[in-house]
Image (spheres, rainbow, N blue to C red):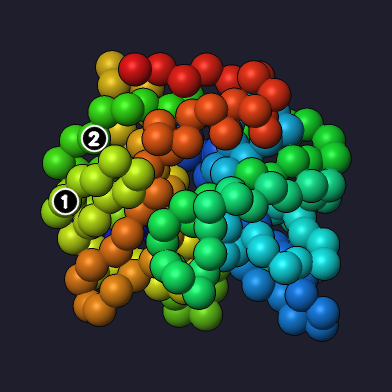
């Protein structure tokens, strides 16, 4: 199964993005998929609206989604940020922590968090395109920055990209800046800045990963 590049003028290094994965959530008899990203071997980040009110969930480890095949790990706990209220805002505090029953395989990358916000960010998402949930890469541009979230120029996001990591590359190493939250209209999306939630993320991840300036 191949991954997609939504900006064909550039060639992403797919090996760098193995830690961007599929979050599969079950609510009753319905299945929902979105995106998550690993920060240590048993902890991932996703959007709160992707993880709230679920019965159980898995993280899939492939570059595409196949419910009946491929390796997946069971989620044993999710933490929704206490400030999130989807009835008041679709994007403010739209952050959740995923804890796994078993560690990720060693070939899956984990990422530290950067407080830097460049004018363009690389985003990975697993939204359904052409009836497939494949790992896809998009270059998105910054429109505005706020203390806890970013506003981005974005024409490519779809349902399922929620929780997708936005990266900065520093000396060949990818670091997390934000996660994709929601799209508004045809060209505007909101992303949650991860450095703003440093204390809460560290508490839920139990200090097993490094935040960098």
Q: Which residue is located at x 22 percent, y 56 percent?
A: 152
Number of residues whose C-alpha sits closer than 10 Å to that of mark 1, classed few (under 14), some (14–19) or many (20 or more):
few
State how far apart marks 1 and 2 are (Cα).
10 Å
Q: Quadrant of residue 109?
A: top right
Q: Nearer the viewer, residue 47 or 176?
A: 47
Q: Which residue is located at x 40 percent, y 32 percent?
A: 195
Q: Nearer the viewer, residue 107 or 148?
A: 148
The relative height of residue 1 versus residue 208 in the rendered view (above or below) is: below
Label 1 belongs to which residue?
144
Quarter of the figure with the N terminus: bottom right
For this view, does 178 lie left or right of residue 156? Answer: right
Q: Nearer the viewer, residue 143 or 31?
A: 143
Residue 127 image point, x, y percent? 48, 68
Residue 199 image point, x, y percent? 53, 27
Mark carried by residue 117: 2
The relative height of residue 154 versus residue 59 in the rendered view (above or below) is: below
For this view, does 192 lie left or right of residue 147? Answer: right
Number of residues whose C-alpha sits closer than 10 Å to that of mark 2, classed few (under 14), some (14–19) or many (20 or more):
some
Residue 163 image point, x, y percent? 50, 55
Q: Which residue is located at x 69 percent, y 47 percent?
A: 79
Q: Secondary structure at mark 1?
A: strand
The relative height of residue 127 versus residue 192 in the rendered view (above or below) is: below
Mark carried by residue 132: none
Q: Quadrant of residue 69?
A: bottom right
Q: Quadrant of residue 205?
A: top right
The relative height of residue 32 versus residue 5 in the rendered view (above or below) is: below
Q: Secondary structure at mark 2?
A: loop
Residue 58 image point, x, y percent? 76, 55
One can see residue 114 in this view: yes
């Amino acid at each position: 199964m191949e991954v997609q590049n939504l900006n064909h003028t550039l060639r992403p290094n797919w090996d760098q993005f193995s830690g961007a994965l599929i979050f599969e959530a079950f609510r009753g008899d319905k299945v929902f998929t979105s995106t998550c990203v690993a920060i240590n071997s048993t902890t991932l980040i996703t959007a709160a609206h992707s993880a709230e009110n679920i019965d159980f969930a898995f993280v899939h480890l492939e570059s595409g989604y196949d419910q009946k095949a491929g390796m997946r790990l069971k989620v044993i706990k999710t933490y929704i940020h206490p400030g999130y209220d989807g009835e008041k805002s679709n994007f403010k505090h739209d952050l959740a922590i995923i804890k796994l029953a078993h560690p990720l395989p060693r070939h899956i990358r984990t990422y530290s968090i950067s407080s830097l916000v460049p004018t363009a960010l690389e985003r990975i998402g697993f939204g359904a395109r052409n009836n497939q949930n494949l790992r896809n890469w998009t270059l998105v541009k910054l429109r505005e920055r706020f203390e806890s979230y970013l506003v981005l120029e974005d024409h490519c996001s779809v349902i399922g990209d929620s929780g997708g990591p936005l990266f900065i590359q520093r000396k060949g190493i990818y670091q997390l800046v934000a996660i994709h939250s929601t799209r508004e209209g045809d060209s505007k999306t909101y992303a949650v800045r991860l450095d703003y939630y440093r204390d809460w993320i560290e508490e839920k991840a139990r200090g097993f990963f490094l935040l960098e300036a």
